[in-house]
Image: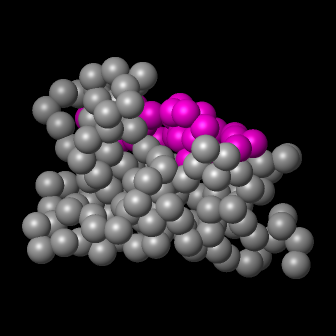
Amino acid sequence: MKESNIYGVANIVGDISSPNLTGIAYFKPFKDGTMVEIEINNLPGSKAYQLFPIHIHDGKDCQLSKEGTFLNVLGHYNPTFEEHPYHAGDMPVLFSNNGYAYLKFYTSRFKVFDVNDKLVIVHEPVANENTTNFGRKIGCGKITMYHI
């Protein structure tokens, strides 16, 4: 089966701190990498515009603990052991506009097949996009492959 016939989708849900957070991420083969498209609704926060880090993590599921936090998300997808922000799973920050964010970008850091069964994680907002302390994981979605 040709890679161009495959695409990934992650349906993103919020944790107990952000129960209304919903979103979807698409991963489509493009050139020598992947076109990523993400749309998120109901991001939390009291400011009209906030920055939300978003990454691909090595975890296998979005199971919640008794306390309502994501249990098994593991670390950033980083098969080449790079420093942040050069992990394969590091993505541009989401720019929230009154709780809504849309992001589309191209990356050659991974192919669609590479992220199958990995997780898309949305972190709580940060004051500086260059931070390495991402805080609470407020959104999670498992990437599942589909054949066209």
Q: Is residue 124 left or right of residue 31?
A: left
**Can the viewer see residue 10?**
no
Confirm whether the magenta stretch covers residue 42: no
Choose between 129 and 88: the one closer to the eye. 88
**In the rendered image, the vertical position of residue 47 relative to residue 32, given as above or below:** above
Q: Is residue 48 left or right of residue 112?
A: left
**In the rendered image, the vertical position of residue 99 relative to residue 39, given as above or below:** above
The answer to which image quadrant residue 5 occupies is: bottom right
Magenta span main SS: loop
Q: Which residues are magenta?
A: 82-109
Q: Quadrant of the C terminus?
A: bottom right
Q: Is residue 54 left or right of residue 88?
A: left
Confirm whether the magenta stretch covers residue 85: yes
Q: Residue at x 23, y 27 (%)?
A: 48
Q: Quadrant of the N terminus?
A: bottom right
Q: Residue at x 15, y 62 (%)?
A: 16
